[in-house]
């Protein structure tokens, strides 16, 4: 039984986990344990390793165990918005992984396993909102990668091996302390940025994100207050409304029908 606790202090049991399995759009099995208040990886889900998708996002998990390698069928893994400081090396054994989101955690470059370069079928990788000061050149081995999120880190450069990935279409490097932003933009020009929208409640936002949202909302309110009021709606008293015409015509038809 898992040590992780969900809302109201309830433990994540095998029964709860089984009831959280859904059928994905493509017919695969999706285990959704997002936003459950889990602090420890639930060991009970190791009995459900036949799922195709695993969502543990928006929890408070600090560590993913090496036993994640048991999920060999996994194609979709979402760990965003936790408190992860490292990833196990065994994550590189998930050869079927297509999507990996580890955005908004506490990952550093030192604790980013080199084994990520073994995920040969990976199409989407999101590393945004972490504590990365550099990107391993070994990620250039991900030849199938289409989308890469590196925004809101401490990066000063992007390796050529990553920028020149043959199938990379979307790259988001915004809000990194690049020494020459113009030069970075030149490299990013042919690559579209990742634009992902997450809808969350205010209580799930960190202090800085909440303040930023509140500031933007205040700006929007001020802008709306400055917008001139619309002019008075024009009226056309001489025009008959369609209903009045229809009513007159209907009355004429009724009278003519009654008195042929």
Image (tube, rainbow, N blue to C red):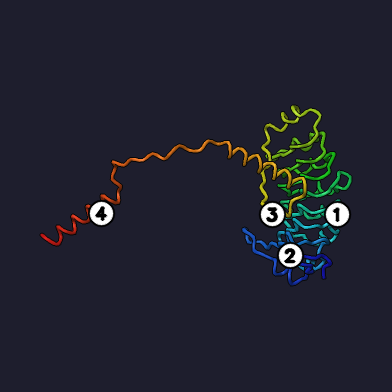
Mark 3 or 4, which is nearer the eye?
4
Q: Quadrant of residue 44?
A: bottom right
Q: Nearer the viewer, mark 1 or mark 4?
A: 4
Q: Give the residue drawn at x 84%, y 48%.
A: 107
Q: Quadrant of residue 232?
A: top left
Looking at the rendered image, the quarter that the C terminus falls into is: bottom left
Q: Position of residue 99 (x, y in %)?
A: 72, 51
- Is residue 10 at all visible to an observer of this figure? yes
Image location of residue 20, percent across then percent down: 70, 66
**Which residue is identified by label 2?**
50
Residue at x 16%, y 58% (from the top left corner): 255
Q: CA distance from mark 1 to mark 2?
A: 20 Å
Left/right of residue 123 with respect to residue 245 in the rendered view: right
Say which quadrant the N terminus sits in.
bottom right
In the rendered structure, which disc, 2 or 3, sits on the residue that comes first in sequence? 2
Label 4, secondary structure: give it: helix
In the image, residue 30 sits, relative to residue 144, either above or below, namely below
Q: Nearer the viewer, mark 4 or mark 2?
A: 4
Q: In whole angstroms, how far apart are the C-alphas of marks 1 and 4?
A: 77 Å
Q: In 3D space, how far apart are the residues under numbered discs 4 and 2 (Cα atoms)?
A: 68 Å
Which is more N-terminal, label 2 or label 1? 2
Q: Which residue corresponds to mark 1?
A: 88
Q: Nearer the viewer, mark 1 or mark 2?
A: 1
> First in sequence: mark 3 or mark 4?
3
Q: Callout 2: helix, strand or loop?
A: loop
Q: How many marks?
A: 4
Image point (28%, 45%), residue name:
240
Query: Does dot 3 land on a helix, a strand or a loop?
Result: loop
Spatial distance from mark 3 to mark 4, Cα to Cα?
A: 52 Å
């Amino acid at each position: 039984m898992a040590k992780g606790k969900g809302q109201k202090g309830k433990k994540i049991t095998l029964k709860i986990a089984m009831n959280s399995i859904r059928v994905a759009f493509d017919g695969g099995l999706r285990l959704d344990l997002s936003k459950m208040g889990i602090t420890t990886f639930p060991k009970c889900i190791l009995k459900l390793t036949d799922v195709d998708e695993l969502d543990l996002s928006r929890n408070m998990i600090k560590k993913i165990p090496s036993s994640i390698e048991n999920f060999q069928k996994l194609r979709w893994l979402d760990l965003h918005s936790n408190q992860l400081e490292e990833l196990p090396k065994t994550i590189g054994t998930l050869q079927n992984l297509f999507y990996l989101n580890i955005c908004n955690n506490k990952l550093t470059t030192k604790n980013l396993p080199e084994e990520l370069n073994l995920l040969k079928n990976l199409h989407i990788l999101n590393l945004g909102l972490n504590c990365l000061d550099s990107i391993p050149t070994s990620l250039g081995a991900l030849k199938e990668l289409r989308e890469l999120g590196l925004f809101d880190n401490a990066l000063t450069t992007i390796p050529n091996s990553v920028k020149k990935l043959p199938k990379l279409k979307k790259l988001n490097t915004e809000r990194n302390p690049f020494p020459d932003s113009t030069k970075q933009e030149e490299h990013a020009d042919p690559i579209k940025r990742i634009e992902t929208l997450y809808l969350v409640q205010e209580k799930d936002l960190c202090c800085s994100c909440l303040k930023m949202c509140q500031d933007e909302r205040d700006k929007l309110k001020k802008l709306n207050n400055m917008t001139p009021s619309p002019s008075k709606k024009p009226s056309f008293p001489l025009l008959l409304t369609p209903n009045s015409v229809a009513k007159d015509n209907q009355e004429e038809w009724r009278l003519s029908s009654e008195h042929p």
